[in-house]
Image (tube, rainbow, N blue to C red):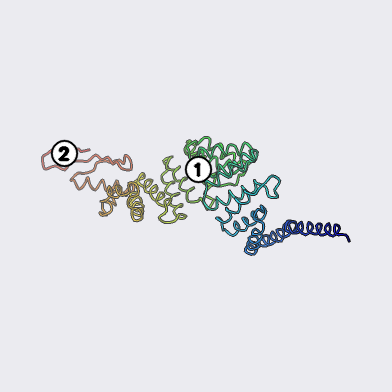
Amino acid sequence: MTLIGFIIIIGLLFFIFTGAYFLFPSIMAPKNLTAIEKLIENNRFREAQTKLISFLEKDERNLAAHYLLASCYHKTSQLSEAVVEYRQALKYHTPGSEVGENLIRKKLARCFREMGNLNESKNEFLILTTKEPDNYENYFEVGKLFHESGFYDRAVNFFTKAVTANAKHAESWALMGQSQFQIKNYNEAKNSLLRTLKIQPDQKIPRYYLGLSLRFTGDLEWAQKELELASKENSIKDKAILALGMTYCDTGNFQKAISEFNRGLQYVSSGSNTALEMHYLLAMAAEKIKSIDLAIQNWETIFKIKPDYRDVQQKLSQYSDLRTHDSIKDFVIANTDQFSEICTKIIENMGLSVLNSKLISDNIFRSLAMEGAGKGMKKQQVL
């Protein structure tokens, strides 16, 4: 072999080994990542993390490895670490990459949501609305984040875009209706919630908000039907019954309202805001029908938990005599027959003889009586 031939062979071997050195890892990388993906599928996250960290030490620009490591962290609730890796995946993303940018952003947005960072989550979904303008899910997610943050006007705008892209998305209609209710657009809320129930008739929370909206638009009978159906849902049972009782107060049916509030108190947590509101409205309804004893019981219950609740202290002060003098309490809480009897006795104890009497209302008694007189003096009639 000539010297030139020997040099050519050595050169070829150098290029072969050099190429193999750089190409072998890239050839083997997909196989290594496939094995790691199987570890993740089998919930062997810690083992997968260890291998991915080792893999990235040798190939730190590998998008797929960063994405898989982010997924491991995400599934094991290591959310801060997951955010870092999702962002690294975005950093190394190029057109045609094996993992799409939109998928990475959706995972990153959900990770931010789980962390409670609603603003960053919203920003990612907003970017996605520009990249996927026909995808209703992104508009829905932005609307939901605005709704949860209390920006109901802006939430309505994005829910409107969501239902424009997909008119059959019940959850968008439902949350749009709730947002409209919060900004007191009750008729719009009613229409949105009816669209929800047309798509998913068995939903109870939309029925609850529909009942509330109907109450404010004055359709109390329909509101009562919706709230009764909503009360079948355990998660909102207490609130639905509270609202139902309020509709009976609106119609002046205080006895029925008291019945509903008493039913609702079986399902509320003692001392909760809903429980306090129920006791307060129950007392108000009881006062309206002159059941002062029942009203006092509920005001006293509230006072023990939260003395400064609304005007409870003033109410207890107003009826302080009834709380300490049984005879006054008996008079105030007397039924109509007892009230007539007490009034008659009061007149007789004044030295008058009752000629006739009539109960005008539950708290007005009219009597014509004869005045007692000495011998030889004319007797007078007294009204």
Mark 2 sits on what residue?
379
Residue sitting at x 43%, y 52%: 262
Residue 207 figure quarter: top right
Question: Secondary structure under badge 2?
Answer: loop
Residue sitting at x 53%, y 53%: 115
Disc 1 packing (10 Å; few <14; some 14–19; many ≥20) = many
Residue sitting at x 70%, y 48%: 97
The x and y percentages for residue 168 are: 64, 40
Whole-Å distance between the Cαs marked 2 and 1?
Answer: 59 Å
Which is in the foreground here, disc 2 or disc 1? 1
The x and y percentages for residue 13 are: 81, 59
Of residue 288 and residue 120, the one placed in the foreground of this image is 120
Of residue 342 and residue 309, the one placed in the foreground of this image is 309
The x and y percentages for residue 128 are: 61, 42
The x and y percentages for residue 155 are: 53, 40
Judged left or right of residue 239, residue 302 is: left
Query: Looking at the picture, which amino acid does disc 1 mark?
Result: Gln
Marks 2 and 1, the one that precedes in the sequence: 1
Of residue 274 and residue 17, the one placed in the foreground of this image is 17
Residue 127 figure quarter: top right
Question: Secondary structure under badge 1?
Answer: helix
Instruction: In the rendered structure, find residue 224 and report the number of the disc placed on it.
Output: 1
Please identify the quadrant where the N terminus is shown: bottom right
Residue extending farthest to the right is: 1
Query: Looking at the picture, which amino acid does disc 2 mark?
Result: Lys
Instruction: In the rendered structure, find residue 184 and report the number of the disc placed on it.
Output: none
